[in-house]
Amino acid sequence: MHLVQFELGNGERRVGLVDGALVREVQGATSTRELALAAIDKKISLAEQVDSLGLGDSHDYSQLRADLMILPPLDHPDPAHVLVSGTGLTHLGSASARDKMHQHGNDESAMTDTMRIFKWGIEGGKPAAGQAGVQPEWFYKGDGGIVVRPGAAFPQPPFSEDAGEEPELSGLYVIGNDGKPYRLGFAIGNEFSDHVMERKNYLYLAHSKLRACSFGPELRVGDLPQNLAGTSRILRDGQVLWEKEFLSGEANMCHSLENLEYHHFKYSQFLRPGDVHVHFFGTATLSFADGIKTQPGDTFEISQREFGAPLTNGIAPTEGVFQPGGIKQL
């Protein structure tokens, strides 16, 4: 089952079930979050909740995407109650590009912190069921205000030094009224980052992640295949500038999803009833590692057959909202 959130021409919201070239409205539903909370309270699955409501009017899916009417597949009426986070060095092969960024000097025999934490993941990232493994690298991206709808452009702030894609899987979660996390499913995502800033010093990783992101357009309800292969592409002036396969799913990861989820939700401040969490699971494929320099007007396209329609986003420069010396003394 694949779900989307979208707007009608009058601004009203709907939740839809993707049915081939059509999107069919879920009767009476305007929010996947509300659908999920109702399912949690009734102790049924999200798919069962959708089935119980039934389907209504149909819409042309490609037209909704072309008109930028598709919303992120999970959100909250108050963006401050959405936490966007992620984990890195989780995929086999993911350490290579990062290690090159973080090496200094010519001592190749010295293991960088990047390689050290990747090695820990290889050794202890997939513990037995119900056990806690080694904790991964973790980072904060922002709240719901940084999420860009599918098809829209990423804002590139004037202080940024790069506008680079990161094709990733994202897990979508709601905290139930019982204070427990529930996974609705997964979506493909673009965990847009500043790799030039990160390359200067790995302690700048936190800064480099404070950028916009996007995920969707579809929420895949249910379990995730073990092996996933998709394509990450950059278009410039309508032509393919760069293209590469990216692999994901647990067969291509050094951490289990269960372990990554445990080390996120073990923190009590992340268990506030009603909140939404969007968590990026990492990648091993970056155009930056191949020497690509993106620019405003470029288009990112991330596709994976198991997730339906591709996720596309552009790049648009923006003015800074805060300037040096902008603090006013009260």
Image (spheres, rainbow, N blue to C red):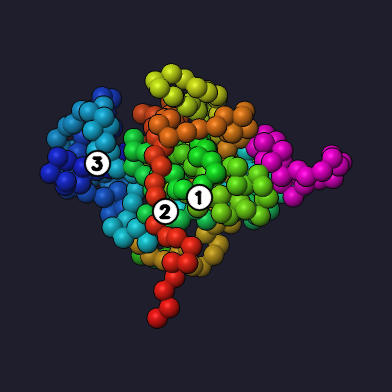
Nearer to us in this view, 243 or 317: 317
Residue at point 71%, 44% (across, down):
102
Check residue 320 in the rendering and tell me which mark sits there, or answer none.
2
Residue at point 50%, 32% (across, down):
294
Measure the alpha-carbon separation of dots 2 and 1: 8 Å
Residue placed under numbered mark 1 in the picture: 159
Quadrant location, the N terminus = top left
Q: Judge from the rendering whether residue 175 lies leftward or rightward of residue 191; answer left or right.
A: left
Could you say where residue 195 lies in the image, as x and y percent from the top left? Answer: 59, 42
Residue placed under numbered mark 3 in the picture: 6
| Above or below for 94 versus 290 | below
Q: Nearer the viewer, mark 2 or mark 3?
A: 2
Could you say where residue 96 lies in the image, as x and y percent from the top left? Answer: 70, 36
Residue 132: within the magenta? Answer: no
Extreme residue toward the front, this view = 325
Look at label 2 and name its amino acid: Gly
Q: Residues within 10 Å of mark 1 (few under 14, many from 20)?
A: few
Cβ atoms at labels 2 and 1 below 8 Å apart: yes
Cβ atoms at labels 2 and 3 below 8 Å apart: no
Quick check: can you spot residue 8?
yes
Look at label 3 and name its amino acid: Phe
